Amino acid sequence: MMKSELTSKYIELLKASLLNELYIENEARILHTFINRLNGEFVNFNDYFNIGLSKPEVMGLLRDAKLNGDTITLLQKMADGTTREAHELRNLTELSHTMIGKKRLDHLQHCVETVLIENIPGDFIETGIWRGGACIFMRGILFAYGITDRTVWAADSFEGVPPPTWPEDAGFDISRDVLPVLAVPLEDVQQLFRRYGLLDDKVQFLKGWFRDSLPGAPIEKLSILRLDGDLYESTMTALVPLFDKVSRGGFVIVDDYGSCPPCKRAVDDFRAQRGIMDVLQVIDGQSVCWRKS
């Protein structure tokens, strides 16, 4: 597998587009507007002309979020001088096509290129795709290298995260009623694939709750299993039917291990139950992976 300069530049441009780095100044202007409105402050339109110079703290906040995949929570000043976190604005300020950040995209690229170089058999899957950014990225890498014999499986309810019903998820509710931004319709995701010119028969969508859609999915082998389900239930109901399909040398990537306690518990429980001793590699403050031995 040859990696040309053109291939490298395409993959890097794809990352930058998915992260909205190409138009980061416009995103900073939108954030600055929300901050002003939230706190009833005067809007100085001169600030918008060169936002990087006038509001370096906003640009810094954005750059850090795009590197690490962190969620930006704006602070509102209260009448008594205290501040509160305006979590509800997350539904309006999540503007990129992926939340996972550049560190995780770089690592995902490493995993994809490794299984291609080493000829580890199997398709790729992400369980919990949001707007589809990570799946678009995996499909884009395959396109860049001219690989036509692998499929990217995109599994999601397309209705957001399920309400917590398992005892392990008690008190951890990020369902549609709480975070509607996480509920992205299938048609919207497919349209985004089209914008990138990457919607074809090498992308297959699995719609539904994982407990229903994954056990009977027509997947033979996997070389990359990427889990992004947040909950104990969503993590466990993906691992149970899919882990045995991961080829030796394939990668299991867990997006929420460091940020969602129920997800971490599910992964730890599954590994303990199956006697998995493969070392967990830390990707960033939220994500880990292991390579199946």
Image (cartoon, grey):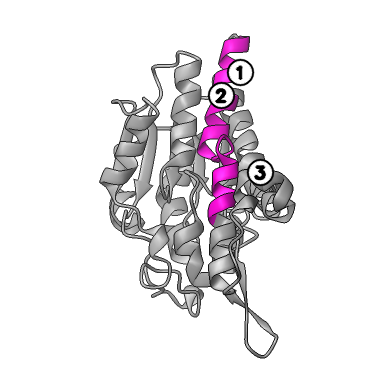
Q: CA distance from mark 2 to mark 3?
A: 29 Å
**Disc 2: which residue:** 11
In front here: 76 or 171? 76
Residue type (three-letter) at the residue carrying disc 1: Ser
Instruction: Give the label on residue 8, or none.
Output: 1
Q: Where, quadrant-wise, is the N terminus in this rendering?
A: top right
Q: Where, quadrant-wise, is the C terminus in this rendering?
A: top right
Count residues near mark 3 (Cα–Cα under 10 Å), then give few for <14, some for 14-19, many for 20+: few
Residue type (three-letter) at the residue carrying disc 2: Ile
The answer to whether 143 appears left or right of 79 in the picture is: left
Q: Is residue 116 visible?
A: no
Q: CA distance from mark 1 to mark 2?
A: 5 Å
In front here: 100 or 79? 79
- The image shows residue 134, relative to residue 37, as above or below, that is above
Look at discs 3 and 1 and give the one toward the viewer: 3
| Image quadrant in which you'd find residue 203 | top left
| Marks 1 and 2 in Cβ contact (< 8 Å) | yes
**Disc 3: which residue:** 50
The x and y percentages for residue 21 are: 59, 38
Residue at 32% over, 58% down: 209
In front here: 213 or 92? 92
Residue type (three-letter) at the residue carrying disc 3: Asn
Query: Callout 2: helix, strand or loop?
Result: helix
Residue at 32% over, 29% down: 199
